[in-house]
Amino acid sequence: MSFISRVWSRLGPRAPLRPRIFANPSFIRIPPNDKVEEETLPDYLPARYYPVRIGEVFVDRYQVVGKLGFGASSTVWLAHDLSKQGYVALKVFIRSQALGDRVENEIAMFKRIEQRTSSHPGRSAVRTLLDSFRVNGPEGEHLVLAHPPLWQSVEGAICRSSPRRLPTSGLRFVLKDLFLALEYLHDECQIIHTDIKADNIMFGVTDFSVFAEFEEEEMHNPCPRKEIEGRTIYTSRAIKSPSQIGPPVLCDFGSAVFGDCEHLECVQPNVYRAPEVTLRALWNYKIDIWNVGCMVWDIYEGNQLFHGIDPEHHAYRRRAHLAEIIALLGPPPKELLARGQLASKFFSDEGTFTAGIDLPTSMSLEEIETHLTGDEKRRFLEFMRKMLQWDPERRSTAGELFQDAWLQEQT
């Protein structure tokens, strides 16, 4: 049972609230030709999205009070739980036919997490599923997940800061809970996340009054919106900064896989992709560790460690990504190449890179790290090298990384 559920249970049964009427007409009307929110996504198709309305009540329980965000596979809304008299975040997926197996996959991951009763401290750093249900839209069925509401993502926090990077204290604050979450997922649940990035890590909230303020703001100062072809596209509203930021929580399990079976498929965001995934060698939990290493560099140094932009195609290509890894880490071990089904596309039998482009100039982490000096720089790069290894077996586990001396230093 989640923390919020335990609190509600202690309060005892209450009479359900009546739905409120969201009928304030004083909102800004966005011109029909202006693209906003999910419309700006490259593959946006309006028929895929459920036309959520502010004020709508799902399953006679959750009244939508405002929009929190959007993505390629869902929109996210703050809702008042009329039964429990609290708030939830509703993730409303695009129609199930368009998502394929991903819909069932996310549910399966949360079911396993809920089945693994555990006192592991990483459990609280993994997002909790409170409820799930399906609704019928004009073009098909949609899955809806109800979660405890959170504040904003690490990505959102970085975008609002100057310079656009996490300070050392912020990085340690995020990573300690992230490694506990991964240790819990890997060891207790046998789940590999596969898609760890700054917008999948969100900060918790300890002051729940910010959600009531969000609802009142929508009631009295409704968000701008666009009405087109019988549907309304609302603009997202930010939750006000809470008096105290809660600990980070790892979210979004749509791409996660069970770790207790063999994997060869292509996963992970391009620039965070582990080399064994690119080479199509069997991979396991250690791809999450490589993923975190690349993300850490991104959010701490303020720029990506790898880009993978091919000099001929001017777009991401695997050969360009592998060339960049070679420039940073040196050539891959032959043992890894021997296990990779696609290794022959990029390397000779002797391990020479033969993918048809020149290798970038060799560089080192010491040369490209620009914010630290002396012993602190040395300890940070030692920490980074525990994650950025060609050979997955040489990467540290999440539990080992949590104990790292640099990470545990007091800022």
Image (spheres, grey):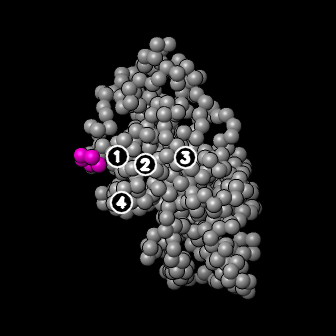
**Tag 3: residue type?**
Asp
In primary-sequence order, the first of circles 2 and 4 is 2
Residue 240 sits in which quadrant?
bottom left
Q: How many marks?
A: 4
Give the number of the disc on residue 195: 3
Q: Residue 12 lies in magenta, yes or no?
A: no
**Tag 2: residue type?**
Asp
Q: Residues within 10 Å of mark 1 (few under 14, many from 20)?
A: some
Q: Read off the residue under disc 4.
A: 410
Q: Residues within 10 Å of mark 2 (few under 14, many from 20)?
A: some
- C-alpha gap between disc 2 and disc 4: 12 Å
Q: Read off the residue under disc 1.
A: 380
Q: Compared to 118, does 396 lie above or below? A: above
Q: Nearer the viewer, mark 1 or mark 3?
A: 1
Residue 338 in the image: state x and y as whole percent: 55, 19
In primary-sequence order, the first of circles 3 and 4 is 3
Left of 312 or right of it: where is 10? Answer: right
- Magenta span of residues: 372-376
Q: Read off the residue under disc 2.
A: 404
- C-alpha gap between disc 1 and disc 3: 23 Å
Left of 88 or right of it: where is 392? Answer: left
Question: What secondary structure is marked by label 3?
Answer: loop
Which residue is at the front of the view, 384 or 315?
384
